[in-house]
Image (cartoon, rainbow, N blue to C red):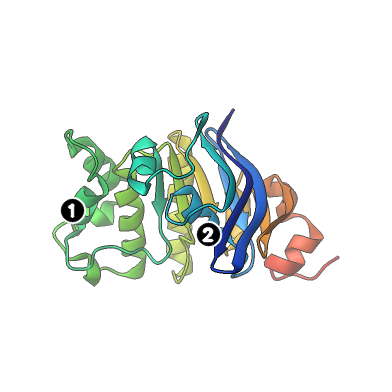
């Protein structure tokens, strides 16, 4: 069953058309990844779904309801949360304060959710009174993920979660993505580390300057000679 459906989506920045009519679906409980070069429209896609940029035309349907034009706050409240590119933690607030801000729309007790984040990321528990700006890049990425989880998302959208991180930290981040998937969270992943993303993806789409190109299971794209040459750093067979 499709939890998220994007149909003929077009987004423009001034006179530049960033998305030129893309269509795709995200099945409930799946990991779907969007790969592509810089400027292909991957981040714009997530921002349009989140309500952060206006949609020129097309429809975005979530859980059977069209969400075009809804405010970002309402979209978050309905269960679509994003981990933004570049972490964007609040540097002058503590780890714990950052997590609580992630739940700003909630009025119930947060204790169980904070404990859940700390189980996923023990380092955050160790540093819960530390200012977020003093954390390492990997720890800030963990905090950004944990902050999004505080709203109990049904769909977690992640924009370049491995960007600028060391290989061992990247491995930990992708392990957490798989853990969240096992917990039943649907994940829409934008990632330039195509090799890592395709290895965990149920389905994948390639964005090429505003258009959708190839698509298939993660395994199919991982083994496609054209994808290997363009995104995985290996020559065509």
User: 80 above or below 29?
Assistant: below
The residue beneath circle 2 is 44
- The 10 Å Cα crowd at callout 2, few under 14, some 14 to 19, many 20 or more, is some
In the picture as drawn, the residue positioned furthest to the right comes out as 237
Q: Position of residue 122 (x, y in %)?
A: 27, 52
Residue 120 x %, y %: 33, 46
- Relative vertical location of residue 43 with respect to residue 58 in this rendering, above or below: below
Quarter of the image with the N terminus is: top right
Q: Nearer the viewer, residue 73 or 187?
A: 73
What is the crowding at mark 1: few (fewer than 14 residues within 10 Å), some, or many (at least 20)? some
Report how far apart the C-alphas of labels 1 and 2 lie in the structure: 30 Å
Residue located farthest toward the left when viewing the structure as drawn: 129
Camera-nearest residue between 99 and 19:
19
Tell me the residue at 62%/64% (across/down).
Answer: 17
Q: Quadrant of residue 115?
A: top left
Q: Residue at x 48, y 54 (%)?
A: 54
Q: Which mark's residue is nearer the viewer, 1 or 2?
A: 2
Q: Quadrant of the C terminus?
A: bottom right
Q: In the image, 192: left or right of 162?
A: right
Q: Nearer the viewer, residue 194 or 68?
A: 68
Mark number for residue 96? Answer: 1
Q: Earlier in the sequence, mark 1 or mark 2?
A: 2
Q: Is residue 203 visible?
A: no
The residue sitting at 32% across, 63% down in the picture is 140
| Local secondary structure at mark 1 | helix
**Residue 76, horizontal then vertical, whole percent:** 36, 43
Element carrying mark 2: helix
Q: Residue at x 70, y 48 (%)?
A: 219
Q: Position of residue 193 (x, y in %)?
A: 57, 63
Marker count (numbered): 2
Where residue 180 sits, quadrant-wise, is top left
């Amino acid at each position: 069953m499709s939890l998220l459906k994007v149909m003929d989506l077009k987004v423009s920045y001034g006179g530049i058309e960033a998305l030129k009519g893309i269509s795709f679906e995200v099945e409930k409980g799946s990991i779907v990844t969007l790969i592509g070069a810089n400027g292909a429209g991957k981040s714009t896609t997530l921002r349009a779904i989140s309500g952060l940029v206006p949609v020129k035309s097309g429809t975005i349907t979530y859980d059977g309801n069209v969400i075009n034009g809804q405010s970002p706050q309402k979209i978050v409240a309905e269960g679509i949360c994003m981990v933004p590119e570049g972490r964007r933690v609040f540097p002058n607030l503590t780890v714990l304060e950052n997590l609580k801000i992630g739940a700003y729309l909630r009025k119930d007790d947060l204790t169980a959710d904070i404990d859940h984040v700390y189980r996923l990321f023990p380092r955050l528990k160790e540093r819960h009174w530390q200012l977020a700006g003093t954390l390492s890049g990997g720890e800030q990425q963990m905090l950004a993920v944990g902050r999004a989880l505080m709203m109990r998302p049904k769909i977690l959208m992640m924009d370049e979660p491995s960007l600028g991180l060391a290989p061992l930290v990247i491995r930990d981040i992708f392990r957490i993505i798989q853990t969240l998937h096992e917990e039943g969270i649907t994940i829409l992943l934008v990632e330039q580390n195509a090799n890592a993303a395709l290895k965990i993806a149920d389905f994948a789409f390639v964005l090429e300057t505003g258009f959708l190109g190839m698509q298939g299971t993660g395994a199919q794209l991982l083994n496609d000679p054209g994808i290997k040459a363009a995104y995985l750093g290996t020559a065509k067979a």
